Image (cartoon, rainbow, N blue to C red):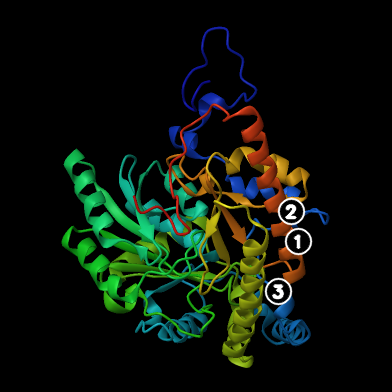
């Protein structure tokens, strides 16, 4: 196999006539396992526990449609026009009000509106990472982040977590190990609240210690917080950015608390970093869609958005409870999982000898889909883990999906007992309901 930019071997034939033209960095651009699932998981006969799609049926669609119609009728010449790469000023002010719920004191000038927080993550990686630079990330970590890091040829070093999130001592050890090799650590990427995929939350007493470790070693912190307002007990945790505004870049999104299809997110960055982000945004999209921004702004101004967040929390708590009760009822001995206190996900460890990536095609045949744990690691770990997303299906569908999944796992165990273990890679990675602490 030839990498992009390399000439084909003598006598070799490429299916892609442009292979030699691609930049070397495209070698790191691979399709995520999650995206590959959507075509199959969207079939009505399949219970999808794979994708983290919000429960949009909870939105007041009638009033929203009226507001959008009025917006175009009254402000269409602005809403349908080009805008600034920085974002609509009124929305940036409202975003500051949203972040204030997490203790963040921000100025609208330091907010850059993006096409979803994924764009923000991509821009942050682009402006900070050269090929070979190191990004520290929790293990497991968000698959979209791993894709961005790979696309810019950054090397990911995972830092293990436990039930209380990122372990400060593990972070110290990871920093020391990287520094001994002479490589540069550009930033720590972390999802402190209701982690994707692990479902755990960074303990409040650990947050200051994590920030101090990074500050003392000159490491930037990138805080990704799409689920922070979706705690089932109503508690909103203090953002890392609220404690250390000079060394934390904060990523936010309306995808989980309003509407994912509008693709409106933001980056809050230190002032000098903000300037680079605006330039990066201009080169990537010229400007985020003005109409989408104004829809979000109108929604925040005219609707009880805090009440809507509460409605979402209640819906997701009901679905979380359905997932946990079904796991308790159906999963075979040797399976473990965490009980998230917010967000969208349960992280499951299956019995020894079951490979969740190898099992996935057979699960889809049995009309259930999940996300294999291997997609959330940059180093191939996670073959005994899987992520269940409870945010989208009804509680009844969740229970049926978990029942089907448990049966597939039991079948895998029976095959192993009958024919013995299947040769393959060694099983490593998390072995507890929460991520790996080894």
Q: Residue furthest right?
A: 45
Q: Nearer the viewer, residue 257 or 391?
A: 391
Mark 1 neighbour density, 10 Å: few (under 14) some (14–19) many (20 or more):
some
Front tag of 3 and 1: 1
Q: CA distance from mark 3 to mark 1?
A: 21 Å
Specify whether 41 is left or right of 221. right
Can residue 115 be seen here? no
Residue 56 bears which disc, if any? Answer: 3
Of the numbered discs 3 and 1, the one sitting upstream in the chain is 3
Front tag of 2 and 3: 2
Residue 184, position in %: x, y?
Answer: 24, 46
Helix, strand or loop under label 2 = helix
Specify whether 247 is left or right of 146. left
Residue 239 bears which disc, if any? Answer: none
Q: Nearer the viewer, residue 33 or 381?
A: 381
Residue 417, position in %: x, y?
Answer: 62, 34
- From this view, report whether residue 94 is shown above or below residue 257: below
Which residue is depicted at the point 82% across and 57% down?
44
Helix, strand or loop under label 1 = helix
Which residue is depicted at the point 47% across and 26% down?
5
- From this view, report whether residue 253 is shown above or below residue 69: above
Which residue is depicted at the point 23% across and 61% down?
214
CB-based contact (under 8 Å), mark 1 and mark 2? yes
Residue 400 bears which disc, if any? Answer: 1
């Amino acid at each position: 196999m030839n990498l992009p930019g390399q000439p084909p071997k003598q006598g070799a034939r490429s299916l892609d006539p442009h292979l030699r033209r691609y930049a070397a960095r495209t070698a790191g651009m691979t399709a995520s396992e999650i995206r590959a699932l959507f075509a199959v998981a969207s079939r009505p006969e399949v219970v999808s526990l794979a994708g983290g799609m919000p429960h949009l049926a909870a939105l007041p669609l009638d009033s929203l449609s009226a507001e959008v119609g009025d917006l175009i009728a009254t402000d269409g010449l602005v809403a349908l026009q080009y805008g600034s790469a920085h974002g609509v000023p009124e929305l940036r002010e409202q975003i500051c009000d949203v972040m204030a719920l997490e203790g963040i004191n921000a100025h609208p000038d330091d907010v850059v509106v993006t096409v979803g927080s994924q764009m923000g993550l991509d821009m942050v990686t682009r402006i900070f990472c050269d090929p070979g630079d190191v990004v520290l990330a929790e293990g497991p970590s968000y698959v979209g982040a791993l894709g961005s890091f790979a696309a810019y040829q950054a090397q990911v070093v995972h830092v293990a977590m436990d039930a209380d999130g990122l372990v400060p001592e593990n972070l110290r050890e990871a920093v020391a190990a990287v520094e001994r090799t002479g490589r540069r650590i550009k930033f720590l990427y972390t999802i402190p609240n209701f982690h994707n995929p692990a479902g755990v939350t960074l303990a409040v007493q650990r947050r200051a210690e994590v920030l101090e470790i990074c500050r003392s070693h000159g490491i930037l912190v990138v805080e990704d917080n799409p689920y922070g307002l979706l705690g089932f007990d109503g508690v909103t945790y203090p953002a890392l950015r609220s404690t250390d505004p000079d060394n934390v870049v904060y990523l936010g999104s309306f995808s989980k608390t309003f509407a994912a299809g509008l693709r409106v997110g933001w980056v809050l960055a230190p002032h000098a970093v903000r300037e680079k982000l605006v330039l990066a945004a201009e080169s990537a999209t010229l400007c985020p869609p003005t109409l989408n921004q104004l829809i979000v702004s109108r929604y925040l101004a005219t609707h009880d958005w805090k009440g809507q967040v509460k409605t979402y929390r209640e819906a997701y708590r009901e679905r979380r409870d359905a997932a946990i009760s079904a796991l308790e009822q159906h999963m075979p001995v040797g399976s473990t999982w965490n009980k998230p206190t917010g967000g969208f996900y349960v992280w499951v460890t299956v019995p020894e000898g079951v490979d969740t990536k190898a099992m996935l095609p057979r699960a889809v045949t049995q009309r259930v889909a999940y996300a294999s744990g291997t997609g959330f690691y940059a180093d191939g770990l996670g073959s005994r883990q899987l992520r269940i997303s409870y945010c989208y299906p009804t509680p009844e569908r969740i229970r049926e999906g978990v029942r089907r999944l448990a049966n597939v796992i039991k079948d895998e165990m029976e095959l192993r007992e009958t024919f013995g273990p299947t040769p393959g890679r060694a099983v490593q990675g998390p072995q507890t309901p929460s991520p790996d602490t080894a």
